[in-house]
Amino acid sequence: MVMGRLLIVSLLAFALAVATPASGQEDPSTEKARVDQHITELQAEIDAANAREGVLTSQLSDIASELRAAQSAVDEAQSTLDRLEAELTTEQAQLERLTQLLHSQTRRLVRLQHEYTRAVAVLETRVRSAYIHQPPDTLAFIVSAASFSDLIDDYEFVKRIGAQDERIVQAVETARTKAAEERRATVRTRTLTVAVVSVISARTADARAVRDQLVADRDTLSAARHLKESAIVGARASREEYLAEVDGLAAQSAALAAAIRDAQGGVGSSGAGVPSAAGLIWPVSGPVTSGFGMRWGRMHEGIDIAASIGTPVHAAAAGTVIYASWMTGYGNLVVVDHGNGLATAYAHASALLVRVGQAVAQGQTVSLVGSTGNSTGPHLHFEVRVNGVAVDPLLYL
């Protein structure tokens, strides 16, 4: 990542600046101020990365909720579409059956129409022939008959033929009429089925369009979720890079602070118990690892003095204990009022050895060094306050 390479190059540049001083190089105090300023800028970047991650995480949560709702809507729309498609398939199958039945009935009706026409023609021919030739035929029957009984039989035979032709015509007419009625009923049913198929087809098309739009919306949300997840990963990676550089610069800042103290002749690190011009003594012996002022985007209102856990912490001046308890961030804290608006505070203690209202002498042990509260390791956080306002303790020690 380009950002990572830039950060590493920056860190190496600072390290080289401290490790290999050159002629004309800035003094340690100026260099430390520059390092601390860069640490402050990096801390701002870390805070911004944290803020971005928080916003992105919130947005991702909202998108996840919207995505679940979108998937639910897609599932519901798909269920509706499946049901409509099933109905459409059933109605289309019914329409196909009715169409085939109508074709069959049409063919049968046409055939019956032809048969009826032929039957009527045969009947008309036979009736016409009987009408025209009845006297000669009757005489022929009489002459040709061998007996009266034969005459009766032949006459009845002719009548039966005529009656049969008439019954055939009537039967064909009945069949034709019934076939026509059945066909009309099929036409009506098929017409209704066509209307139903048309309605269901339209509803199916609408449902499919709704489903497709919901799927598109869901896919858009899914793409947005992937983008947010990638952005969160990027923000976290940037934060980790910033933190890594801050750690390196913090060590460099501490090294510069040590160089400054060495240049000042070790002031503030002996803890010899000799009062300063302001009348205060060092509360504990050890190097100052963090000074007074802005640190990582916030005000550091005291100094941090490195010491091992259990090291006695001495009152910087005589006074009265006005606080001896736990305080958020400070951990176990002792505050001593020295009068005239001056007070000192001793934080992160592993144990408190005084109580509120107790009078203490200068140099008296008030607590033991620890790492309670917001602390990254054992040390004493020491503050000097004038009328409640934090001032640089190094001006009083």
Image (tube, helix red, strand yellow):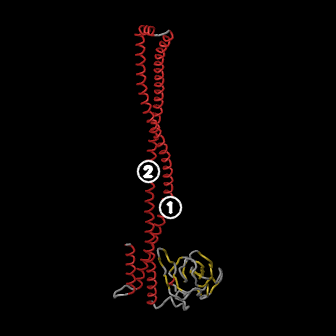
Whether residue 239 is visible here, answered yes or no, is yes
Helix, strand or loop under label 2: helix
Please provide percent x and percent y for residue 54: 49, 66
At horizontal 46% and vertical 46% (from top left) the residue drawn is 207
Q: Which residue is mark 1?
A: 61
Residue 265 shown left or right of residue 366 in the figure: left
In the rendered view, would you say 297 is above or below 25? above
Q: Identify the mark at residue 213; answer none if there is no mark.
A: 2
Helix, strand or loop under label 1: helix
Q: What is the crowding at mark 2: few (fewer than 14 residues within 10 Å), some, or many (at least 20)?
A: few
Please provide percent x and percent y for residue 317: 58, 86
Residue 57 shown left or right of residue 19 in the figure: right
Q: Choose between 354 and 328: the one closer to the eye.
A: 328
Q: Amino acid at mark 2?
A: Gln
Please provide percent x and percent y for residue 109: 43, 28
Q: Amino acid at mark 1?
A: Ser
Spatial CA distance of label 2 from label 1 is: 23 Å
Q: Choose between 72 and 42: the one closer to the eye.
A: 72
